[in-house]
Image: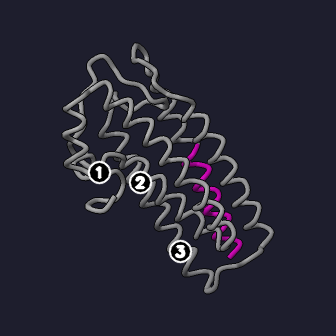
Amino acid sequence: MERLRNIAVAVFVLWLLIDGLVVFRRKSGTAENRDRFSLRVIAAGNLLAWTVGIWLAYKQIGVIRPTMPVQIAGLVSLGLGILIRSTAIAQLGRFHTPNVAVLANHEVMDRGLYRHIRHPSYLGALIAFFGFGLALGNWPSLLVIMLLTPPIYLFRIREEEAALGAALGERYASYCRRTKRLIPGIY
């Protein structure tokens, strides 16, 4: 149990470092910044959720039983979430920025994962967070992470969609009518 938890924490921290380097090396440049502090909300809220989740896991309050199969499923989910997020970021390419920004020549991305949902990188992150919570092997950790992170991302989604709708007009509205936000065919 402790060994798998340590592996989960190591993989999670390594992913956050790599993800941060990839995401924050892309500057919005000449783009119009439309971020109404959502980047700060994501950073602060996620940090709080992860810190409390990890702390609770090492306190071993509310251990999930059977622990090892759940932790392995969590590590698989963590990896799947990382893969989805990384693929989405690569597919969005130069249009992906850490803050909500719209480039002068911004296009509606409707290929790859974006053909099915509007925010696959956030879906990937949420799957990874869920997997991380499971891999910690602790119910309170999973609960804290999954109670805090989805509302943060839903706030961010609302900000992004408002900015893209205002900038891209009918092209984005049409795309929104054809796709769901996070779960294909559902939401």
3 or 1: tag closer to the N-terminus: 3
The mark closer to the camera, 3 or 1, is: 1
Residue of label 1: 117
Look at the numbered disc 1 and give the secondary structure of its residue: loop
Q: Is residue 176 magenta?
A: no
Boundaries of the magenta span: 1-16
For the N terminus, give its image quadrant: bottom right
Q: CA distance from mark 2 to mark 3?
A: 20 Å
Colouring convention used in this rendered image of the protein: one colour
Residue of label 3: 72
Mark 2 touches mark 1? (CB < 8 Å): yes
Rate crowding at label 2 as few (under 14), some (14 to 19) or many (20 or more) other CA atoms within 10 Å.
Answer: many
- Expressed as whole percent of the image width and height from the top left, the position of residue 28 reads 43, 21
Q: Amino acid at mark 2?
A: Leu
Rate crowding at label 3 as few (under 14), some (14 to 19) or many (20 or more) other CA atoms within 10 Å.
Answer: many
The label on residue 56 is: none
Residue of label 2: 123
2 or 3: tag closer to the N-terminus: 3
Q: Amino acid at mark 3?
A: Ile
